[in-house]
Image: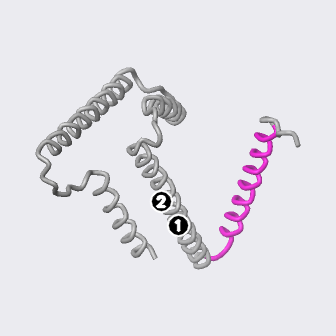
Amino acid sequence: MAKPKPEDAAEDAKKIVDEAKNFIEKAVADIGKTSATKQLILGTASGWITGFITMKIGKVAAVGLGGSVILLHIASQKGYIDINWDKINKKVDKISDKIEKETTGKSPDWFEKVERFVDRKLDKAEGLLKKKEVKAKTWYRNFNDDGSFRATESQIFLASFVAGMAIGVLCGK
């Protein structure tokens, strides 16, 4: 089976959007001809349904996205995967610049780009310092070897995440 050409896909998408637009315009025109009470009831009901569905979809998307980010972070910390954050950040910057240009009509100025670059470098330096701090603490702990258990940042984060998720599940019902 042959792949559809990009032009065909664009035309199909345009047809679908046009049909949806016509349907919505017709529905709004039909509702506009009814009494104010009916309009109020239909507007309230459709708004509530839209909000409810949006919240449910948003929750599922947030849990999925957040969970995948957490799993990637844990896998990266444990050494299973190595993430090239510089490459990801550059790609995100390009995409955000495109989005900003599309929405505002102008590209970000050089000062914003320099600010982003410096901020990223400071974050990287902070990460390196934290790694060195962790190595120094580990060395000191091994040197003293008091034998007491101390929770690491990832263990505390994971426990609080699980507790927060349980509370959210209970409250979100």
Residue 68 position, x and y percent, is 49, 52
Please name the residue that numbered disc 2 is placed on.
63
Closer to us: 132 or 11: 132
Crowding at mark 1 (Cα within 10 Å: few <14, some 14-19, many 20+): few
In reply to whether residue 33 is colored magenta, the answer given is yes
The magenta segment is 8-35
Q: Which amino acid type is marked by label 1? A: Lys
Closer to us: 58 or 170: 170
**Total marks in image:** 2
Callout 1: helix, strand or loop? Answer: helix
Callout 2: helix, strand or loop? Answer: helix
Q: Which amino acid type is marked by label 2? A: Val
| Numbered badge on residue 56 | 1
Asked whether, in this view, residue 106 is left or right of residue 164, the answer is right
Image vertical order of residue 66 relative to residue 39, above or below:
above
Tell me what residue is drawn at x 79 percent, y 48 percent. 15
Closer to us: 165 or 100: 165
In reply to whether residue 139 is colored magenta, the answer given is no
